[in-house]
Amino acid sequence: MTRKVKTQVKILLGVVVLAIVLIVAWHFGLNPGALIEAGLLAMTPLALAAIGECINEKAGVVNIGLEGILLITAVAGVYGAELAGNGYVGLLVGMIVGALIGFLFGLASVYGRADQIVAGIGINVFAVGFVPYVIMALWAFPGIHIPPKEVLVPLISTPLMRISAITILTIILGILLHYMLHRTPLGLRIKAAGEMPMALDVAGVRVDYVRIFTATLGGALTGLGGAFMPLAWFGGIVKEISAGRGFIALACVVSSGLEPLLALAFAFLFGFAEGLAYTVAVTPGVKEAVPYHLVLMIPYIVTLLVVTIFIGGRRFPRAMATPYVREE
C-alpha cells in the first residue's frame, strides 16, 4: 500500500468516526448543529496557528512559542478593542502584535542564530508571567477580565448554526496558503529555504528574508487566533485562556507533515473533540452520566491518539531549525 493510499484510508476512517460520533450524539439528545458550531469555534485559533506554523517550518524555522503568542495576543486584542471601541480593531491589534513577536523571533533565529527551540520556550515562559501581570495592571482584577459586549465580534446566524466570519476566513486562508505553497514561485522559494537554503542563495534569493517573512506570517496568524478567543468565542479573558491550544496546534502541524490543508483538517478534528467535550459538559442528562473531568480530557486524548497514528513516515525539511550562514 502506497503512502498516498495509506493517507487516504486514514482520512476516510476519520470521516467515518466523525459520522459515528454525530449519530451517537443525536441518539443521546445532543444537537449535532450545536456540536459542529462549537467544533468550528474551537477549530479557528488552532487552525490559524497551525497553518501559519506550517509555512514557517517549510522555510526551516521552528517556533514552538505558539502557546505564548496566543496568550499575549489575547490580552493585546482585548485591550485594543476596548481602546478603539471595536472588536475587529482588536483582532487587527492581536494580529499586529503576533506579527511583531514572530518578526523578533525571526531576527533572533536568523541573525542571532539563537536556538529556535529554546527561544520558543522563552516566549511561552515569558507569556505565563506577563499575561497575569498585564491583566492586573490594566484592569485591576487578578486573572480575569470581561470586556463590554459592544466590543465583542458577533457570530453570523445561519439556518443550521452560528458561525464566525473569522472561521470562514481561516478556511479560505488554509486553501490559499496551500495553493501559494505548491503553485507559486514564492511557495517554491519557501520550500527551498527549508530544504536547500544554499541552492536558493546561489539562485539569488535571500534566505534570511524568506525565513523572516514566514516567521512574521506565522506570528500574525497565531496572533489573530489569540485575539479571536476572547473577542469572538469566549467573550472574556482569563490568564490561562490558551489552555494548551498552542501545543495542540503544533500537534496539527506535525501530524499534517507541514501541509496547510491537512493541518486545517486536523484542527477541525481537535476542535470537534473540544466542542464535543463542551457540549457533553453542559447537556442535561448527559453531563450527569459522564464524569466531568473525564469529558474535559477528550481533546487531549484525541491529540495523543492522532499524533501517535499520523506522525509515522512524515518527512520534514532537511534544514529545519538550522541557521543558514551566508558565505560572502
Image (tube, grey):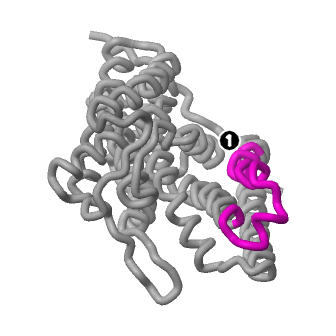
* x then y, percent, for residue 19: 74, 75
Q: Main secondary structure of the magenta part?
A: helix
Who's the residue at 45% across and 42% down the image?
Answer: 238
* Magenta segment boundaries in residue numbering: 280-304
User: Dot 1 corresponds to which residue?
Assistant: 314
Q: Is residue 236 left or right of residue 269?
A: left
Q: Is residue 310 visible?
A: no
Q: Is residue 95 left or right of residue 18?
A: left
Who's the residue at 79% across and 78% down the image?
Answer: 28
Report helix, strand or loop for mark 1.
loop
Closer to us: 93 or 260:
93
* x then y, percent, for residue 213: 30, 36
Q: Is residue 195 above or below residue 42?
A: above
The quarter of the displayed image where residue 300 is located:
top right
Q: Is residue 197 left or right of residue 15?
A: left
- Asked if the stretch drawn in magenta spans residue 34, the answer is no
* x then y, percent, for residue 145: 37, 45
Q: Is residue 300 visible?
A: yes
